[in-house]
Amino acid sequence: MKFSPAVSSLQPSATIAAATKAKELKAQGKTIYEFTLGEPDFNTPLHIREAAIEAMNSGKTHYTPAGGVPDLLKAICQAAKRDYNLDIEPQNVVVSNGAKHSIHNVLTALCSPGDEVLIPTPYWVSYSALVELAGGVPILVEASEDDGFLPSVEALRAKVTDRTRLIMINSPSNPTGVVLPVELLREIGELAVEKDLYVLSDEIYDKLLYPGASTQCFMTLSEEIAKRTIIINGVSKAYAMTGWRIGWTIGDPALIKAINKLQSQQTSNPCSISQYAAIAALTGPQECVGEMLQEFEKRREYVVGRIKDLPEVSFVEPGGAFYVFFNVSKHFGRELPGGVTVKDSTEFCTALLEQAQVALVTGDAFGAPGFVRLSFATDMKTLEAGLDRLSEFLKN
């Protein structure tokens, strides 16, 4: 069977591939310490689950408008005002099947074949693939560990051509956990205004900030920047609702209308039940978000302390999200038990899984060779045991 060039060149998600391999080993009866997926381990809060049950029992199980039910669009607008003091109307919002779908919709709506999209590295594994699926060309702009993984506006400017259409940013960041300073966000926005570009700001982790870190919704930086801004967000991370698949796009009404048209042909609408659960998440008690963040903060402190003690490993401390992205390149070229010699991050992760039963994600997939990502969105017992094994692996 012959497949399209876009699908033939497409690589599977590295995070999902790593998690799948870990699950296969678990199915064989092996104990695996899994730190691969960016998924809160908490159950979805009770009031949100109850809203879903009520929606089912009251018959809200049919088609909805392609871009989301009016009550959810209204709830997103109200939450934007509450959380960011951002004034938007339902015509500025379209709801999709998760934030990944939202990003794909934006790129499909905006990118013509050959259009370029600037992506600072390290970047979330799906960004470049989604750009390519939309016919665009991902242009990677390196942000180094020495610079705290903060992208340089000068480096972004140097990559702008007459084919550049969009800049994609993510703060707090997956995979680094780095939070971009407000002044840097403003400089990126001003570059977009100057060069007549759009900025896609992925703010899915915006509620997961740790003490000392602060950020600002990109659309609130200035009126001129707001005109060039597209916000991506959703309920997956803050409300432990990854499987419910509800994300949204905030942008110019013309873009929202185009995505509505696109989505009406793609998927008809997001899951009706999930939409009503999302309404409860946004409009109901918000204490659950703080409670989960408090637990993530404890885990972050523990993991950061343990990784500081690992031999010949370096990292930038995460200010948000639930990842630690650390440099293991000094361990490359060393012979492991069984005569295995690790040459890169991918081989490091394979050897670590096979010999120590610890599952991490290779930095090669994030555009950062030499690094690996650990998600601390799991319980303390698993973190303690897994980090013990990681430490022993590196020392041996």
Image: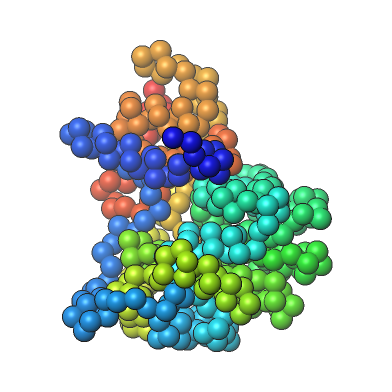
245 vs 328, left or right, is left
**Outermost residue to the top:** 339
User: What residue do we see at 54% from left, 63% from top?
Assistant: 105
Question: Outermost residue toward the front?
Answer: 1
* Residue 155 at x, y percent in the picture: 76, 50
Query: Could you say where residue 344 lies in the image, as x and y percent from the top left?
Result: 52, 28
Q: Nearer the viewer, residue 189 or 184?
A: 189
Relative image position of residue 352 (x, y in whole percent): 38, 30
Quarter of the image where the N terminus is located? top left
Number of labels in the image equals 0
**Residue depicted at x 61% and y 80%:** 253
Residue at left 38%, top 49%? Answer: 37
Depicted 13 relative to depicted 61: above or below: above
Q: Position of residue 99 (x, y in %)?
A: 47, 63
Give the camera-side residue of 235 and 74.
74
* Residue 235, quarter of the rendered image: bottom left
Is residue 208 placed above or below 307 in the rendered structure?
Answer: below
Quarter of the picture containing the C terminus is top left
Tell whether 120 sits left or right of 164: left
**Coloured how?**
rainbow
> Is residue 212 visible to us here?
no
- For the question of whether residue 228 can be seen, the reply is yes
| Residue 236, quarter of the rendered image | bottom left
